[in-house]
C-alpha cells in the first residue's frame, strides 16, 4: 500500500457517479502524469431478478431529477417505461472488472452509463452487458463465460471487502494512498480544481 495512488470508488450504475463524471474526467486528466489512478467498483446492489419495488423506482427517479437540476446532467427517463428495473448492480460491476483486465475499464464504465442514462437500456441484464462488451472490442463469448465464473465472483467480493477497509461513505469516493495512509478526499461535484489543489497539497 506504500505506492502513491488515487483510488476512485464508484458503481457503474450509480447516478451520482454519472453526475460527477465530467468533473472526474477533468480531475483525472490533471492528475494522470502525477500518480497512478485506480478504479474500484462499489457494488451498490447484489444480484437480483426481482422487479424493483415502486417506492424505490420513485426514489431513484427523484434522485435523477435532483442531480439533473443541481449539475445539469442528462437523463433519459424513458428507462422507467421501456425497461423492467431491478435493484442489481453487481453484473455491471463484474463487467467493469472483466474490462479492467483488457485495459478497457473506463470504456466499459462509459458504455454502461450511456446505455443506462442516455439510451434507456438496462445494465442489470446480461444481454445489455454482452452487447456493450462487444461494442468496446471485447470477445463476446469469452466475456459471457467470465461474467458467470466463480473466479470473477471472488474478485468482485474481494474488491468489495477492500473498499470496506477504505475511509469512504457512499459513491463516488476518492481515496489518496500515500505514505502507507489512506486519506479520504472530499469530492466537489462541479470544481475539479479544488479537489486537485487538495491532492497536490497532500503530495507536496
Image (tube, grey):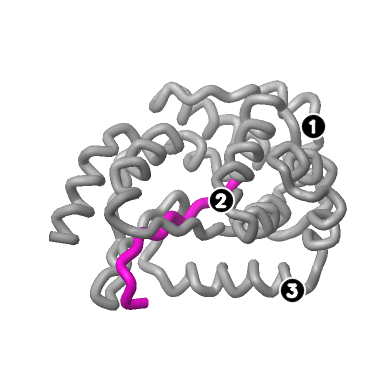
* Pointer 2 or 3: first along the chain: 2
Residue marked by disc 3: 151
Q: Decide if residue 45 is in sight here.
A: no
Image quadrant in which you'd find residue 188? top left
- Front of the two marks 1 and 2: 2
Q: How many marks?
A: 3
- Residue at image x 69%, y 60%? 46
x and y, in percent, of residue 159 in the image: 56, 69
Vertical comparison of 74 with 57: above or below: above
Which secondary structure, mark 2? loop
Q: Residues within 10 Å of mark 2 (few under 14, many from 20)?
A: many
Residue marked by disc 2: 11
Relative to 177, 66 lies left or right: right
Q: Please check the rendered image and state whether residue 3 is part of the magenta-colored stretch, yes or no.
A: yes
Q: Which mark is residue 83?
A: 1
Of 185 and 79, which appears nearest the observer?
A: 185
- Residue at image x 58%, y 38%? 110
Q: Please check the rendered image and state whether residue 148 is part of the magenta-colored stretch, yes or no.
A: no
Bounds of the magenta span? 1-12
Of 62 and 172, which appears nearest the observer?
A: 172
Which secondary structure, mark 1? loop
* Pointer 1 or 2: first along the chain: 2
Of 54 and 43, which appears nearest the observer?
A: 43
Q: Are marks 2 and 3 in contact (CB under 8 Å)?
A: no
Vertical comparison of 77 with 165: above or below: above
**Mark 1–mark 2 distance (CA, rounded to whole Å):** 20 Å
Q: Quadrant of the N terminus?
A: bottom left
* Pointer 1 or 3: first along the chain: 1
Amino acid at each position: 500500500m506504500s505506492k502513491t495512488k488515487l483510488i476512485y470508488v464508484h458503481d457503474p450504475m450509480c447516478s451520482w457517479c454519472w453526475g460527477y463524471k465530467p468533473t472526474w474526467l477533468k480531475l483525472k486528466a490533471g492528475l494522470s502524469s502525477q500518480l497512478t489512478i485506480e478504479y474500484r467498483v462499489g457494488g451498490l446492489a447484489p444480484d437480483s431478478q426481482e422487479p424493483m419495488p415502486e417506492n424505490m423506482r420513485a426514489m431513484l427517479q427523484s434522485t435523477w431529477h435532483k442531480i439533473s437540476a443541481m449539475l445539469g446532467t442528462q437523463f433519459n427517463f424513458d428507462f422507467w417505461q421501456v425497461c423492467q428495473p431491478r435493484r442489481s448492480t453487481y453484473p455491471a460491476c463484474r463487467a467493469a472488472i472483466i474490462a479492467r483486465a483488457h485495459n478497457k475499464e473506463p470504456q466499459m464504465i462509459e458504455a454502461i452509463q450511456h446505455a443506462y442514462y442516455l439510451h434507456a437500456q438496462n445494465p442489470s441484464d446480461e444481454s445489455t452487458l454482452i452487447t456493450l462488451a462487444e461494442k468496446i472490442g471485447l470477445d463476446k463469448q469469452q466475456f459471457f463465460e467470465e461474467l458467470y465464473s466463480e473466479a470473477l465472483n471472488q474478485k468482485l467480493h474481494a474488491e468489495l471487502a477492500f473498499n470496506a477497509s477504505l475511509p469512504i461513505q457512499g459513491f463516488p469516493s476518492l481515496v489518496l494512498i500515500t505514505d502507507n495512509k489512506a486519506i479520504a478526499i472530499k469530492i466537489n461535484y462541479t470544481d475539479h480544481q479544488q479537489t486537485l489543489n487538495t491532492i497536490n497539497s497532500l503530495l507536496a
